[in-house]
Amino acid sequence: MGSDTESKGFLERLKAGLARTRNAFIKNIDDILLGERVISQKLFEELEETLIMADVGPAFTYELIEKMKEQAKRNELGDAEVLRKVLRDTITDTLRKNEAPLQIPVNELFTIMMVGVNGTGKTTTIGKLANALKKNGTSVMLVAADTFRAAAIEQLEVWSQRVDAPLIKQKTGADPSAVVFDAIVAAKARKADAVIIDTAGRLHTKVNLMEELKKMRRIIERELPNAPHEILLVLDATTGQNAVVQAKMFNEEIGVTGIILTKLDGTAKGGVVIGIAKELSIPIRYIGIGERLDDLKTFKSAEFVDALFEQDAR
């Protein structure tokens, strides 16, 4: 019963969080579609402009407009409601393909590398993820491998105490790979279920950063077969198309197995989740919609679309 209420509460918060996106995206499209209009080239051009402005990306925009034009040709677009349904169905199909909850196996150490540029909410997300995993009965160890910023280590320390998860750290300036090595040894000894590794995100030294991440990855691979099991990229929804650029870069450089999209509640650019899904085909594992400890939730496409179109969950 509790989880039903919790789920309903999250959906309400998701609806509220997506209000700005809905106003900048769905409402604008409704204004175009639901006016007394004939379906014309001008309508498609306005639609295209609105979609691009909504950060859903060029690939999704092209696919949607082509679908609508195809139906118009077959005279299946008698009214705007049909166009709206095509929009909703296309969003749903795109997001469903990228819905893949994180699966943590039992009886083996599961390693998660968290990557992303500074400012995306990475360290906070680690705390929330640790909390979510612990709620499911997974024992978690945190690893402070962003050793270049004392603040990052301190922030992770606060989270480790808050969610009652042990933290492996060294002093500021230590070799991140050495911290990771210590953590794997400690996690094996303590029989932890999962380790979550915080990493640096200094993009102005991109080459150094990527080399450092690759080195960490090699250390994990050496110590554990088939690891790291998950490389989760934390993206800030408020950056819109910039988030897609970051995702492409991290994916090309070190490989990304899943995405966590944060700050969906503070932006009109929530449509970027559609662009990411369409252009990258990387699973969206979690979304974040606020500051609360439980504001990180497994991404469910149906819930997201319902909230975007402001309908009750099916």
Image (tube, rainbow, N blue to C red):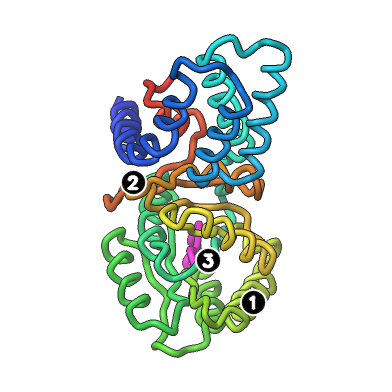
Q: Which residue is drawn at 64% across and 36% down?
A: 97
Q: Which residue is drawn at 62% across and 81% down?
A: 207
Please say whether residue 16 is visible from this viewpoint.
Answer: yes
Marks 3 and 1 sit apart, C-alpha to C-alpha, by 16 Å
For label 1, the residue is 219
Q: Which residue is drawn at 58% across and 52% down?
A: 258
Q: Give the range drawn in magenta.
A: 190-197
Q: Residue 119: where, in percent of width, then height?
A: 40, 67
Give above or below for 198 relative to 314: below
Label 3 or label 1, whichever lies nearer to me, is: 3
Judge the density around disc 3: few (<14), some (14-19), many (≥20) Cα neighbours within 10 Å: many
On screen, residue 7 versus residue 233, left or right, reads left
Q: Residue 20: where, in percent of width, then height?
A: 34, 41
Quadrant occupied by the N terminus: top left
Tell me the element at label 1.
helix
> Please, what is the three-letter code of the amino acid marked with disc 1?
Ile
Residue 265, label in figure: 2
Q: Nearer the viewer, residue 307 or 133?
A: 307
